Image: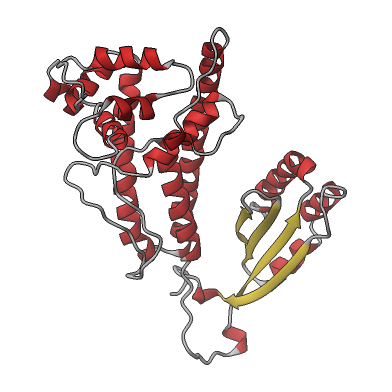
Amino acid sequence: MSSTESETGKGMSIFLDVFRRADKNDDNCLSREEFQSFFSDGILKPDELEELFNKIDTHKSNNIDTGELSTYFSSQLGPFRAIFGTIEELSQGVSNALQDTAQEYPKKSFYDQFTVRFMMKEISTQLAAVQQSLETAADHLEADALKDRESQTLPVDVLGPPTNSTAGWICRRARRQLSTQTSIPLAGESQTSISLAGKSQTSIPLAGLSGLTEQVDRLKGFIDELENKVKIDPVDEEQVSLEDDNLVTVVSRKMDVLEEHESTFREHLRTYIETADNEPGCISISVRSVKDGNLFTIFEVWASPEKAKSHMTSAVLTTLKEKCVGLLAKDEECNSFNIPEKWMSGTES
């Protein structure tokens, strides 16, 4: 395989991104110092890294270029070639989806916007699960590699302050720090940002391949932006007759769950949502939780104040409250308010 083919073949563009991140002085080649700084993993010893450098440096120039790096890894990919190719397609697909969503989301109905947010959350969840599987496997491989040899310390300029963490955590931390330095735009793309409704919002870089972590973070950030842009269309003032003024009721239930009971609470919450969502008059139910915390807020939208009031004494809500006895740090905080039905996008005739 030629250098050109190595650099441009499917699944290989990720190594152009690797090269850019390792090339700290941007001189389009990796010195021995840059190579050892980037690829040191806490397992290979300095003399072994030196030997690997010489193996990759087929031109014997004491520097490694993109062709040499790509050629070496292309011969080692095995079953991972298909994965790297999929990551390329995933990166392009995410960028396309975010661009399309930024343009079309504000025009969608209230319920179609909910569907978009749900699908993006599910994609983010699936990517996070894949990422977790890969990190767990990497931990096991690194632990096995360290059993019969002394672990080596990453260079100070990569690692930062000393730490007693395992090699796997150290290396991933170092890679994350390096991966924020540069990125390679996809073919034909420039650095771009997405905003909703013509306003400056969270910037979403449409850049290349920094791995599953970047894709998960991009999706989570965009989901948060979409949830903050749920469109309700009031006018400055409108006159209505009470008999024709159809109202919907929004209910929020805030629950502060004890950390040791979070898993049990989630099971009861899932049962509640699945049942309550099918009750007559229930328009939607969604949940938000606080990162690195145990605070959950359930948002319910009911077709009328009467439907919301009826639900307050329903068996499903009573059961949830009974199941939560002893699981909460303090009493549930419940609030509700009514809004005109036609303020919700997609419901106005």
Visible residue check, residue 1: yes
Q: Is residue 119 left or right of residue 338?
A: left
Q: Give coordinates of residue 343: x percent, y percent.
A: 50, 76
Q: Is residue 86 left or right of residue 302?
A: left
Up the image or down, 279 lies above or below 169; here it is below
Which of 309/105 is in front? 105
Which of 134/86 is in front? 134
| Color scheme of the displayed model | secondary structure
Up the image or down, 3 lies above or below 101; here it is above
Up the image or down, 97 lies above or below 156; here it is below
Quarter of the picture containing the N terminus is: top left
Question: Quarter-wise, where is residue 23 in the image?
Answer: top left
Count how many numbered circles sit on residues in the image. 0
Q: Give coordinates of residue 21: x percent, y percent.
A: 31, 37
Q: Is residue 135 left or right of residue 188?
A: right
Q: Give coordinates of residue 157: x percent, y percent.
A: 43, 37
Visible residue check, residue 280: no
Q: Residue at x 52, y 18 (%)?
A: 142
Q: Residue at x 42, y 64 (%)?
A: 109
Up the image or down, 311 lies above or below 267; here it is below
Quarter of the picture containing the C terminus is: bottom left
Question: Quarter-wise, where is residue 32 in the image?
Answer: top left
Question: Quarter-wise, where is residue 332 in the image?
Answer: bottom right
